């Protein structure tokens, strides 16, 4: 049965990655991790996943390349504009009552979501009192997020999303175009801490008023989702807000009862009184 | 989860797919015993009308698939727009926002290949009308895992490219006119 052999190889390869490099994909949703490993196998021209495992075990330079396959980097600025509109109109009025704020973008990819949030907070006059944490496990993505540079051909979509989110300014106020690239204003990351942090293996590091973790937990199995939501629950201040991706929900989570649905259509939750 | 059903139907359709599914799904009885997973390519802004549209016409429960949702028998699940739908071996559904495959998200191949892993010979794959090649590799995977491969007769399909490509990739597939597919599925149930 080739299909059973592959399943054994996948389990061994993920175990090897964990023991050798401490990247833990063992409890990611299996069907899609399998697809991505098989893509990596053919990309690197390996006869089998076992051969791929041997290569990555002995050659640390393979690790970032394999991580590029294992983590999905699809993102855009103001992705699902309705989500950012709901933050603007319904969540930020509550946050306004705090003298200082902490916001965590967990799984920030190349920074699209972080810059969206920073622009939103600036438009609403909350930027100066906010500290943002942008975390991810993919070092290339974190580097890209810190640089804040995107190909110009992505900007049209970003601009359209920003408008739909109720943007009060023009997105072009925040970047300069340069050789086919949009370079975002570095003042947007003045209050940002970029950091390597895994929702699977790391712990809570600060108390937040808002956590946005979108299209990350969708790649986890149910047990891991419970772990991640548990971290958010622990990290959130009283009445803190948690936003997840448009096709994610806390409905099947062990922690469902700890949250109330604040804007159900946009998957924004609020932590209940303990 | 021992209660997860051991057989399932996957259906892929593109251009002309709404009409084809309106001919197929309402012809299935309300007590159809297996889950049905469907990828239908439609413009993103129209996709969330699919479940209500079909629910009104069918005896079966019809819904949009949710991430990590346990699969139930006799329920029709549509992939949401802009997300791939996968079936896990433990019987849960999973969504992913991975890159489009062959310009398609959701992708028929992604659904069929994951379902073939999960259900093996218990799976029935059906490719209907469509104007691209999505689903051909998926149907081949269904057959390779020991499942049943069905293709709508391309000569009578609204768009024949997709069923034709599927038949070429999987020449063991059974070719049936659209009107006969529901009866064929009901027949499998009686086996
Ligand atoms: C599809 S992107 C989502 C980007 C953005 N949040 C959005 O919704 O557009 C998923 C991100 O999650 C990151 N990721 C995967 N596993 C993670 C983990 N265990 N902890 C933190 N981030 C993780 C990936 O590296 C990737 O950058």
Image: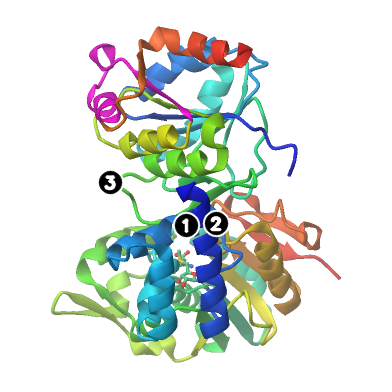
Q: For ligand 1, tell me if the residue under mark 1 lies within 8 Å.
A: no
Compared to residue B58, the image places residue A165 above or below, namely: below
Q: Residue at x 52, y 22 (%)?
A: B54
Q: Position of residue A179 (x, y in %)?
A: 13, 79
Q: Regarding mark 1 in the picture, which secondary structure is present there? A: helix
Q: Which mark is residue A34?
A: 1
What is the C-alpha distance between the residues marked 1 and 2?
A: 6 Å
Kindly identify which residue carries mark 3: B102
Q: Position of residue A176 (x, y in %)?
A: 23, 81
Are discs 1 and 2 less than 8 Å apart at CB? yes
Q: Residue at x 50, y 76 (%)?
A: A121
Crowdedness near tag 3: few (<14), some (14–19) or many (≥20) residues, C-alpha within 10 Å: few
Q: Residue at x 63, y 83 (%)?
A: A101
Q: Nearer the viewer, mark 3 or mark 1?
A: 1
Crowdedness near tag 2: few (<14), some (14–19) or many (≥20) residues, C-alpha within 10 Å: many
Are discs 3 and 2 less than 8 Å apart at CB? no
Kindly identify which residue carries mark 2: A30
Q: Is residue B42 visible?
A: no
Q: Is residue B126 visible?
A: yes
Write down the region rendered in magenta.
Answer: B147-168
Compared to residue B54, the image places residue A98 above or below, namely: below
* Nearest to the observer: residue B32 or residue B82: B32
Q: Regarding mark 2 in the picture, which secondary structure is present there? A: helix
Which residue lies most toward the bottom here? A190
């Amino acid at each position: 049965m080739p299909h059973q052999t592959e399943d054994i190889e996948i389990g061994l390869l993920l175990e090897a990655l964990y023991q050798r490099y401490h990247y833990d994909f063992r409890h990611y949703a299996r069907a899609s991790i399998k697809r991505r490993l098989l893509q990596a196998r053919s990309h690197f021209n390996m006869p089998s996943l076992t051969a791929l495992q041997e290569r990555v075990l002995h050659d640390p330079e393979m690790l970032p390349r394999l991580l590029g396959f294992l983590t999905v980097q699809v993102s855009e600025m103001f992705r699902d504009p309705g989500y950012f509109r709901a933050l603007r109109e319904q969540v930020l009025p509550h946050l306004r009552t705090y003298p200082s704020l902490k916001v965590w973008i967990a799984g920030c990819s190349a920074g699209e979501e972080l810059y969206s949030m920073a622009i939103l907070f600036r438009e609403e006059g909350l930027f100066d009192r906010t500290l943002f944490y942008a975390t991810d496990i993919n070092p290339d993505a974190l580097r890209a997020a810190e640089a804040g540079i995107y190909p110009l051909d992505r900007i049209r979509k970003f601009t359209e999303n920003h408008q739909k989110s109720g943007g009060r300014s023009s997105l072009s106020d925040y970047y300069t175009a340069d050789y086919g690239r949009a370079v975002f204003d570095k003042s947007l990351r003045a209050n940002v801490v970029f950091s390597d942090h895994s929702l699977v293996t790391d712990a809570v590091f600060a108390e937040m008023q808002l956590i946005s973790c979108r299209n990350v937990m969708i790649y986890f199995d149910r047990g891991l989702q419970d772990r991640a939501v548990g971290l958010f629950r622990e990290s959130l201040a009283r009445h803190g807000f948690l936003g997840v991706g448009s096709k994610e929900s806390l409905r099947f989570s062990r922690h469902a009862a700890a949250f109330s649905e604040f804007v159900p259509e946009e998957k924004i939750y609020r932590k209940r009184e303990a | 989860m021992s209660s997860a059903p051991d057989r399932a139907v996957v259906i892929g359709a593109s251009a002309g797919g709404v009409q084809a599914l309106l001919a197929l799904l309402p012809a299935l009885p309300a007590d159809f015993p297996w889950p049905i997973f469907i990828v239908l390519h439609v413009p993103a802004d129209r996709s969330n009308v699919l479940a209500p549209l079909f629910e009104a016409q069918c005896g079966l429960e019809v819904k949009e698939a949710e991430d990590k949702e346990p699969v139930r028998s006799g329920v029709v699940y549509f992939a949401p727009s802009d997300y791939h739908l996968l079936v896990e071996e433990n019987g849960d559904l999973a969504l992913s926002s991975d890159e489009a495959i062959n310009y398609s998200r959701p992708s028929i191949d992604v659904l069929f290949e994951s379902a073939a892993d999960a259900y093996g010979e218990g799976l029935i794959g059906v490719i209907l009308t469509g104007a691209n090649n999505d689903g051909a590799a998926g149907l081949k995977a269904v057959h390779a895992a020991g499942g049943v491969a069905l293709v709508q007769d391309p000569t009578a399909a609204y768009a024949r490219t997709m069923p034709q490509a599927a038949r070429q990739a999987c020449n063991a597939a059974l070719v049936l006119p659209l009107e006969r597919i529901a009866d064929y599925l009901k027949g499998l149930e009686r086996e």
